[in-house]
Image (tube, grey):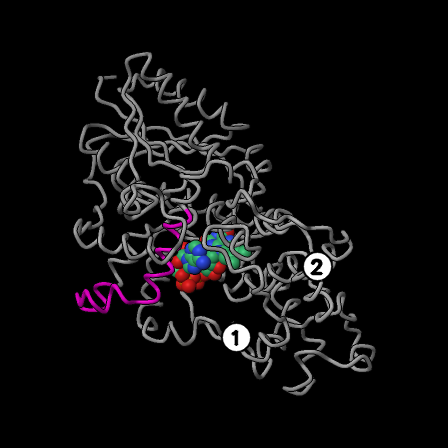
Amino acid sequence: MSKDIHLVWFRNDLRVGDNPALFYAAEQGVVIGIYLEPVEQRVAHNDAPCKVGFINDTVKELRKQLNKLNIPLHSFQVTDYQQSVEKIEQLVEEVNADGVYFNNEYPLNEKKRDDQLEQQLQAKGLKVKRFDGDVIIPPNSVSTGKGEPYKVFTPYKKAWIEFHKTQGMSSLPAPDKQNYKIEQQYDCDFGHDYRKDLWPAGEKAARDTLNEFLPKASYYKERRDIPSVKGTSMLSPYLAVGAISARKCIEALLEWHEGDQEAFYQDTWLSEIIWREFYRQIIIDNPQISHHQPFKSDAKEVWNGQHELFAKWCKGETGFPLIDAAMRQLLQTGWMHNRLRMNVAMFLNKLCLIDWREGEAFFMRQLIDGDFASNNGGWQWCSSTGADGAPYFRIMSPITQSQRFDPEGKFIRKLVPELAGLSDKDIHFPTSQQRKDLGYPDPIINYKEARKAALELLS
Ligand SMILES: Cc1cc2nc3c(=O)[nH]c(=O)nc-3n(C[C@H](O)[C@H](O)[C@H](O)COP(=O)(O)OP(=O)(O)OC[C@H]3O[C@@H](n4cnc5c(N)ncnc54)[C@H](O)[C@@H]3O)c2cc1C
C-alpha cells in the first residue's frame, strides 16, 4: 500500500461530525478507522455494562456513517491499555501507515497510554497527531491573574466565556468522501443491555435528542430541578461517548438564540456545559484525583459509616422516599437526574458517613453516562473535598428537598409505587404505621441526629 495512510483511533469521540482527528487525517490522505474495546480496563475503571452496551451500538452506528464516506472502521477487543498500544503499533505496521491521529482523553491512565504510544511511534519515525475534541476550549487556555489554574467555578466560567468570545470557535464538518474501496472490516461485538428506548445509539440520535431539547431550553432554568418532568436534555450518555461534541451542542444553542451572544452567554444550560469543561481542566491540573485522592489536600475525611447503610443505599431501601426513588431510577435506567445525584451523594457521604469513593465507584458501575471527570467532580463537590465544593455545613435534607422539588410526589409515586397511595403530605416521609402497612422500610438513619453528628465531625 502507498504511504499516505493514517489510522484514526476512535475512543470517546464516536462521531464523524466535529471530530478533529478524523477531519484532519482525512485532509492528509487515506483514513482507516480503528476502535479497540479494552475489556479488562473497563472492569478496572468500573464502567457500567449499560455504558459498554451503549458504546458497542454507537461504534456500529459510527461504522455505518464512516462507510458512507468510504472510510472503514475495524473494531477489536483488547485486554487493557497496554495491549491497546501494542495493537495500534501492530496495525500501523500491517497497513504501512504514516501514523496515528486521535483526540485526547484527559484522565491519567488514558493520558499515560497516549503518551506511551506517541513516544514509541515517534521513535520509529512515525507521525502522531493529537487533538482536543472532547472540550470546547483547549485545556490550559485560561488561568488566573497569577497564571495559576482555577480552583473555583465562577471565575473559571468568566474566563472561559471571555476566551470563547475572542476565539469564536466553530465546529468542524464531517470529512469529505474518500477515494478508497473498503474490502474487509474486522468487527467485534461486546453488547450488553441498556435502555435503548431512552437512548437509541448513534450520532443522529444524539442530534435528534439535542433538537428535541432546544425548544425547551427557555424553561431549563425553572424545570431543571424538577425530577418528575423532562426538564433537562438527557444528552449526557451521548456526550460521554462522544456521539456528539459539546461544541456542536452549544453552537446549536447559539443558533437557537438566533445569534444573540448576550442571551447565549447568560444561558444556564451553557453554564452546565462549562461545568463539564471545568471538571476536565481540574483532572488535568490535579493528577492526584486520578489516584483517588481528594482535590483539597486538607480535606476532612471522617467516613466511618457502617457498610450496611451503603448496601441499603445501593438498593434504594433507605426509607427516605426521594433517595430511594432516585436510586431506583439509577438502577432501572442507568441515569439519574442531577438534583437527585446531589441528594443521594450527600445522603450517603455526609449523613451515612460512607466514603465518597464508594459512592463514586457505585455510580460508575451503574451509569450509562459514567464519566470520570464529571462523576468525581460531582462526588467531591457533594462531600466538600472538591474544587469549589459545597461548604461542609451544606447538607441537603432528603425530606425538605423532596417537598421542594417533588411537591406532589409525582416522581416518588412512579419509582416507589408502594407509596403511590399516600397523600402529598405523607409521601415525603411516611409514618411508622404507613411503612408497616405498605412494606416500606424504616429510615436507616435519624436525619436530625445524623446531620448533627456530621457537622461536629466536619467542622
Ligand atoms: C454526584 C454526581 C455524579 C455525577 N456523575 C456524572 C457522570 O458520571 N457523568 C456525567 O456526564 N455527569 C455527571 N454528573 C453531572 C450531572 O448530574 C449530569 O451531567 C446530568 O444530570 C446529565 O443530565 P442531562 O444530560 O439531562 O444534563 P443537562 O442538564 O441537559 O446538561 C447538559 C450537559 O451538561 C453537562 N453537565 C450538566 N451538569 C453537569 C455537572 N454538574 N457537572 C458536569 N457536567 C455537567 C453534561 O454533559 C450534560 O449532559 C454528576 C453529578 C453529580 C452531583
- Per the rendered image, the range of residues in magenta is 254-279
Residue 94 image offset from top left, x and y in percent: 36, 16
Residue 68 image offset from top left, x and y in percent: 27, 42
Q: What element does badge 1 sit on?
A: loop
The quarter of the picture where the N terminus appears is: top left
Q: Nearer the viewer, residue 45 or 287?
A: 287
Residue 369 in view of the camera: no
Specify whether 116 is left or right of 335.
left
Magenta-span inclusion, residue 264: yes
**Amino acid type, label 2:** Cys
Q: What element does badge 2 sit on?
A: loop
Residue 363 image offset from top left, x and y in percent: 59, 52
Residue topped by disc 2: 352
- Residue shown at the point (49%, 34%) measured from the top left: 37
Q: Main secondary structure of the magenta part?
A: helix
Q: Nearer the viewer, residue 113 or 397?
A: 397
- Residue shown at the point (28%, 28%) measured from the top left: 129
Residue that sits furthest to the top in the current view: 124
**Amino acid type, label 1:** Ser
The quarter of the picture where the C terminus appears is: bottom right
User: Ligand 1: does it lie within 8 Å of the C-beta at label 2?
Assistant: no
Q: Nearer the viewer, residue 355 or 69?
A: 355
Specify whether 389 is left or right of 1.
right
Residue 452 in view of the camera: yes
- Ligand 1 shown in quarter: bottom left
Q: Earlier in the sequence, mark 2 or mark 1?
A: 1
Up/down of 22 relative to 123, above or below: below
- Residue shown at the point (43%, 75%) measured from the top left: 223
Which callout, 2 or 1, points to the residue nearer the camera? 2
Q: CA distance from mark 2 to mark 1?
A: 26 Å
Specify whether 15 is left or right of 443.
left
Residue topped by disc 1: 228
